[in-house]
Image (spheres, rainbow, N blue to C red):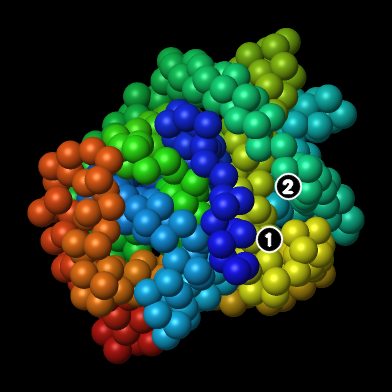
Amino acid sequence: MAEVVQKAARATWSSKWAFILAAAASAVGLGNLWRFPYLAAKYGGGMFLLTYLVMVFSFGIALLLLETALGRKTGQSVVGAFKSFGKRYAFIGWFTALIPFIIVPYYCVIGGWVAKYFAAYFTDGPAALADGGGYFTAFVSGNYESFLWMLIFMFITFLVVSFGVKSGIEKANLVMMPALIVMAIALSIYTLSQPGALEGAAYYLIPDFSKFSPELVIAAMGQTFFSLSLAMGIMVTYGSYVAKTESLTSSATRVCGFSFGISLLGGLMIVPAAFVALGSGDAVAANAGPNLMFVILPQLFMGFGDMATVVGAVFFALVIFAALTSSISLVETCTSIVQDATNWTRRRSLLLTCVVITVCGMMVNLGYNGWSFIQPLGEGSTILDFADFLSNSVMMPLAALMTCIFVGWIIKPKTIEDEIASSSPFKIRKIWRVMIKYVTPVLVVVILIAYVASSLGFFSL
Ligand code: PHE
């Protein structure tokens, strides 16, 4: 009975574009503007970009199709979707459902940093922020301010989710996303016009095959999941709202293209600027980390002279927006998972979600100050690095692996292929099948084993 009620109440997107927009809004966020540029800077520029490009348009798009089709076929969110093929498969859904709970807390910590930088352009002025990293370090290691900004970012996210103002967000996206693109293009052009930047652009765009490493492949794989919001149930849920008549293939292609484009711009804006500031590719690689955006961009903005405050504030405002639309989709997912698990009301589920996320966020934040002695990944690493590593490099690949095995070998790819083909011609059916049955699982297993073995010291990569 409950299921019948749920099915009747299941919403569908108002149009094809509503789904593409919602999926793109979830996909485009800090992953493109904060995470991608620093990974590209760290892992050898062009080599990382190329690996990432190949991954997005091979298994990234294949998984995006799989998840949306699975959602649409079952009409359920992630736990229910797996369960609908038999109770014993529900664990895949549960494992996948854990992942957003690990991501949101640290996502909101970074969201807080962005919000702080937006405000700081007015309170402290652009020069204070452009001091090469001192300002950033003082801020994150300070005692209360970073907590405050994290809480502000969380509060806005929770508030929006509690109102469920989906249509409002959709409309705002329509304005903010193009604004972000225009701004990113303009800043990229500006970056490239700086002396020495072209060399930086070459580092970012031209692959240097000697930079290839297993770490690079793991990082690119994790980034593909993270940036496309894959392997954590979001796209299954979103797919369950897609009308049966709409083409999943063209939607998936658009979402991947859009997200990749923004990442490309994000890198073009930041990596050459870092190159100018630091002088060489090696220096960029050695210094790139989660703080890259907060250290390099303010230096770039200083070049705008009197306009620095405006440019800086507008830029960070747009990033806040991109981050908020993603964090909203994450919290929304967490809430529906709690609701499915407990059968509580949405309100109560949201409350529990908020409490858990706030407490975990505090812990992540403590990693930069009170608990900075906890360095889970070695000298200088933080709890944030660990949460990011655990979710992106370990759990998401495992979730993707289980999903591929499940679809490729247990329920058989045809089940999903028919769903995709029911609304549009599925020309890449054969390639897709090979991707899901062989390429993705083998890639994930090989990479994970190689990585674990090398970190345990069995051999050096
Ligand atoms: N894809 C988002 C980004 O790039 C992050 C995200 C991950 C959002 C998972 C929702 C779900 O920032």
**In this image, 268 relative to 28: left or right?**
left
SS at badge 2: helix
Q: Residue at x 18, y 54 (%)?
A: 432
- Image spot of residue 11 (x, y percent): 57, 44
Q: Nearer the viewer, residue 232 or 32?
A: 232
The residue labelled by disc 2 is 161
Residue 160 makes an appearance in the image: yes
- Image spot of residue 324 (x, y percent): 66, 41
Mark 1: amino acid: Thr
Q: Quadrant of the N terminus?
A: bottom right
Q: Residue at x 57, y 52 (%)?
A: 8
Q: Nearer the viewer, residue 326 or 338?
A: 338
Q: Residues within 10 Å of mark 2 (few under 14, many from 20)?
A: some
Q: Is residue 405 above or below residue 184?
A: below
Which mark identifies residue 190? none
Q: Residue at x 64, y 74 (%)?
A: 341
Which of marks 2 and 1 precedes in the sequence? 2
**In this image, 253 relative to 239: left or right?**
left
Q: Is residue 184 above or below residue 293?
A: above
- Image spot of residue 368 (x, y percent): 73, 63
Q: Residue at x 43, y 31 (%)?
A: 16
The residue labelled by disc 1 is 335
Residue 365 makes an appearance in the image: no
Q: Residues within 10 Å of mark 1 (few under 14, many from 20)?
A: many
Name, please, the residue furthest toward the top: 306
Mark 2: amino acid: Val
